[in-house]
Amino acid sequence: MCSAKINYNFKVLLMTLCLITAPLQSFSAESPIYIEADHMASTEKNNAVLFTGDVDAKQGDLRIRSDKMTVYYTDTKDQGGEKPASATQQVEKLICDGNVEITRDDWLGTSDKMTYLSEQRQVILTGNAKAWQDQNMVGGEKIIYYMDEGRSEVVGGTSVTVGGEQKQEKKARVKMRILQQ
């Protein structure tokens, strides 16, 4: 039993090291990744690692902060159910919840939730999403940041006003502030 526990702990440690050194390669293949959090939990069944409590992830010029971050990675098992000795996991997506803040160079995005799609190299901010470049700001229900292209797309949404027994839905518009020099 002790051997099984040590074996499991070794697998969790190995997977964590792979996550820290390899997975966000789509951000930048050469730069190491540093993740700090109050707690980490790993589940092989879901191919996921959950970081909670003041999560702070950095790689190169990219920084992501949130209350909770779940990293989903590819399964590297071969057809016999065994993992090859030289296998490394690749991140499929990241999902951050609560007080999300992502920065890259002079771009800052904030929201209630963030999804990073590795293959598409997109950051999707939802829920009170705002983005700043220098002192200019844009906000909407959803912001999609295309990392390779250095461009953003902002989508409005709907807001619900509740007054007594009556619910009133109205279209929320994209809002932008441009400071002129």
Image: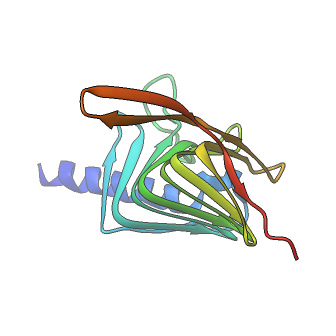
Report the front residue among 158 and 70: 158
Q: Position of residue 55 (x, y in %)?
A: 41, 65
The x, y position of residue 140, in whole percent, is: 61, 45
State which quadrant residue 52 falls in. bottom left
Q: Say whether residue 32 is visible.
A: yes
Q: In the rendered image of this protein, does residue 125 appear above or below residue 102?
A: above
Q: Quadrant for the C terminus, please.
A: bottom right
Instruction: Please tell me which residue is depicted at 74% across the width and 71% down the height of the picture.
Output: 106
Residue that sits furthest to the top in the current view = 79
Locate residue 95 relative to residue 165 in the image: left or right. Answer: right
Place of residue 156 in the rendered image (x, y in percent of width and height, measured from the top left): 62, 38
In the image, taking residue 133 as reference, residue 36 lies left or right, namely left
Q: Nearer the viewer, residue 7 or 121?
A: 121
Residue found at the far bottom of this picture = 181
Name of the residue lying farthest toward the right: 181
Quadrant position of residue 137? bottom right
Task: Name the residue rendered at 39%, 36% in the picture.
Answer: 161
x, y percent for residue 56: 47, 68
Left-right relation of 150 to 121: right
Identify the residue at horizontal 35%, vertical 54% (top origin): 12
Residue 45 seen from this side: no
Which quarter of the figure has residue 93?
top right
Image: 181 above or below 124: below
The residue sitting at 53% across, 37% down in the picture is 74
Given residues 58 and 2, the one toward you in this image is 58
Placement of 150 over or under 106, stated as above or below: above
In this rendering, the count of numbered labels is 0
**Coloration mode:** rainbow
